Amino acid sequence: MDPPPETGFPATLCQWVGEIVQSSPEAARLTLAELIIGALLASGGHVTQAFLALTPRLGWQAYHWMLERGRFRLLGLISALCRIVRREIGARRCFAVIDDTLAPRCSTQAPGVAIRFDHAAKTNRPTFLLCQCFVTLSAVVPCRDRPRSVPLVTGLCRSLGNAGKLAMAKRLLRAVRDLGPVCLLLDAWSMRGSLIRSALRLGHEVIGQVRRDTALFALPPPRQPGRRGRLYGARLDADTVAALPASVHTIAGYGGRSARLRHAVCRPRFLRGVIVRMVWCELEKPGGGWARTRLLLSTDPALSAPAIVEAYSNRWSIEPLFRDLKMVDGLGALWQRGRVTLLRWLHLVQIARTLLVLLTARAEPEVLALIRIGGWRAAATLTPGLVKDALAARFRDFQAFRLIPKTRRKSGPVRSTDPPANAAAA
């Protein structure tokens, strides 16, 4: 019995998938489209679950062969995805986040596996894990309820040291050139001079948290004619910082909590003369009082102190993204034996996750009509999980390859994706 036709599939999602697969060779486009849509509808991370969520056009060996030996470039898919994300964000400032996560493994033969220190310090977990380390660059997309991160490109660390993660982060920045200038948000560990200077050379701005004992120097007095001048002024010690004027602001990114801020324009020693704005931030505790001081750095001195804190609050959106990649999309179930095959399938899964979040941010009527919200939820609730469940319930076992226009091989006649002539006549 033939499956029903794929009527009602969201036109925006179909357009995005077609735009992404257009960057690959024609012979691979239909298979890649099936894998992306299958990863969007299925859960668990296995390739078999992805193409079994649809009506497969080919045998199961063809999909695994495409991942292992298919002639397509990941950078082409990533560039197309970056253009879509940039178009959806619009004229607003684009925030990007770089962070790493660990995926525990049992086998010592998995690609990139090693014994690494787990800095998360979770309960009932050892300090050192046999795991893979993934470094991810994501973009922040504003949604109806809160900002959400969408994964763009991920690298698998080869070495054990921390230098491998920094080198990987620099390569990820070069891979998303089509995203345009961004404001890069980094955690305290990633705020290293080499990475910040690399981001500045590529035209990006950087906001991140640094150590409170960072060596900071005020701007020197103007250079006198005929004199060489100085690069650094007086050092900003604890007494100088305490004497700075403090102001209290409401930070929407932290749930409307109040923050006591002090700020100054200065030069950190580890950036070798780059002028930045430093913000000393103390968030208000729920029970009263002020939390421990956090020191934030922005390479854009024109930004105000409240704007820097609001911008840095977007960095935390990558933590729910890692949770979704592990618990929903099955990052722990990506058991490909080769490094290239693993990264190929991981990026197809991430493309599906990105398109799902973008579809949620758009909140189009044809998508809202598919969602059934439970009675315990607010009527305006819209999450990527609800959209994924609605699409999986409505379009499971449909022919995804018919969403892509007719293609032509390198040689031979046009291959049509329409029903056979005798079936149409019947």
Image (spheres, rainbow, N blue to C red):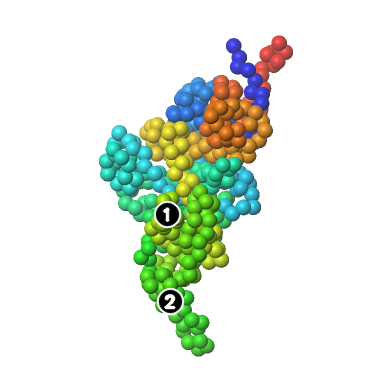
In front of the other: label 2 or label 1? 1
Give me the residue at 66% from left, 31% from top: 366
Residue 4 percent location from the top left of the image? 63, 17
Left or right: residue 12 versus residue 266 is right
Could you tell me the amino acid type at mark 1?
Answer: Gly
Check the image and report above or below for 140 versus 36: below
Disc 1 element: loop
Q: 95 or 204: nearer the eye? A: 95
Q: Is residue 209 visible?
A: no
Location of the C terminus by quadrant is: top right
Location of the N terminus by quadrant is: top right
Q: 223 or 226: nearer the eye? A: 223
Residue 406 percent location from the top left of the image? 66, 29
Residue 73 percent location from the top left of the image? 51, 41
Give me the residue at 52% from left, 23% from top: 53
Disc 2 element: loop
Left or right: residue 259 versus residue 106 is right
Give me the residue at 63% from left, 37% from top: 363
Q: 71 or 341: nearer the eye? A: 341
Check the image and report above or below for 232 versus 256: below
Q: In which quarter of the image is residue 33?
A: top right
**Residue 288 — which label?**
1
Give the alpha-carbon distance from disc 2 to disc 1, as whole Å.
Answer: 39 Å
Could you tell me the amino acid type at mark 2?
Answer: Tyr
Q: Could you tell which of marks 2 and 1 lies nearer the N-terminus? A: 2
Residue matched to label 2:
232
Give me the residue at 54% from left, 45% from top: 147
Residue 42 percent location from the top left of the image? 50, 27
